[in-house]
Amino acid sequence: MAAPLRVVSFGLGPIGLATARLALTKKSIQLVGAIDVDPLKAGRDLGDLLEMERMTGIIVSADADATLGKLKPDAILHCTSSFMPRVKDQLMLCCKHGVNVVSSTEELLLPTLQHPDLAKEIDAAARKGDITILGTGVNPGFVMDTVAVLATGACHSVSKIDCRRVVDAGTRRLPLQKKVGAGISKEEFQKQLATGTFGHIGMRESIALIGKACGWTLDSITQSVEPVVAERDVKTRYLTVKKGQVAGIWNRGLGKEGDKVRIEMDLKMYVGAPEPMDEVQIEGTPPMHLRLIGGTPGDLATAAMLVNMLPRVVNAPAGLLTMLDVPVPGIVV
């Protein structure tokens, strides 16, 4: 039996903690370190942050450079930010230390789309450091892109792909509820939306990834984001959304080749959303229709995707890769 992969958790927000918790249960993975700059987390045992009955002996460090240099892990589980410019230095540090990366950074799903120069720089550093960097997760990374691409494998031809998702944000972590604007006014929603860091991140990347997989030259990728207003008071574990306040988002996207719509996406993510589900419909020969009743539990599935992709990333060629460049996801034990 091969030795377990030695892994460090980098970023211990809700998703980072969920990912670390899962990694601790895997025989093929040995979690050897944890990194977070939050002074309320640094210096504490990871088991304490996870509210476990036992301590892990893994003390959270705020010094990523020193930790990676000392532990020399095979890979990191990276969960710090959605945006490539914000994680550049962290990724470059991993390149320097020769540490593979599985990241939840949404813009890394297809890094060349919005940051081609930065992607080229990171790719060169990864190749020089002989490591692989992959961005993945549940959305983007799975339900509205990888699943659709996988389904085309049974098709002779494909003319259009529709992806739809309904998520009850009330079942998700607090940062996500805030990210979709739960509990704020419509006026504040528009102000937040103007920052460019609000709402679901990664729909453009999902569209572009599908387009690339299908061999389409997409001339335009557009999206719209609108608030979903609560029709009644809705209480979650973390907050209460009153009638008339924003409950979440309605995010739609189009990928066009000339005047032809090749890819259409529809994401409703709001507190109290009824009948959660994930759906992919393919117009092709033969047509395909996949529907996941109840939807995919986002926080659990994101942690699973990150952990399960670890051995695939460690064994992949060096460079800044995408989900199209690595083997299909599958569970690790």
Image: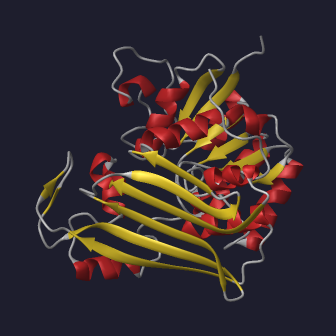
Task: Tell me what residue is drawn at x 30 percent, y 51 percent.
Answer: 174
Q: Quadrant of residue 181?
A: bottom left
- The residue at the far front in this view is 286
Residue 121 located left or right of residue 75 = right
Numbered label tally: 0
The residue under the point 75% across, 50% down is 153
Residue 232 appears in view? yes
Q: Quadrant of residue 118?
A: bottom right
Residue 140: give x, y in percent of width and height: 56, 56
Q: Quadrant of the C terminus?
A: top right
Q: Is residue 13 visible?
A: no
Q: Nearer the viewer, residue 310 or 243?
A: 243
Instruction: Identify the residue at the far top of this view.
Output: 1
- In screen coordinates, is 178 left or right of 288? left
Residue at left 81%, top 43%? 131
Q: Could you say which is closer to the camera, residue 277 or residue 52?
A: 277
- Which of the 4 image quarters holds residue 156? bottom right
Looking at the image, the residue that sits furthest to the bottom is 259
Using the image as rendered, state which of residue 108 and residue 53 is in the foreground. 108
Q: Coloured how?
A: secondary structure
Residue 208 vertical position relative to residue 129 in the rendered view, above or below:
below
Say which of 251 and 162 sits in front. 162
Tell me where residue 202 appears, x and y as whole percent: 55, 64
Q: Position of residue 178 (x, y in %)?
A: 31, 60
Q: Is residue 132 above or below residue 263?
A: above
Up-down relation of residue 217 to residue 200 (above or below) = below
On the image, the x and y values in percent for residue 83 come to: 57, 64
Location of the N terminus by quadrant is top right
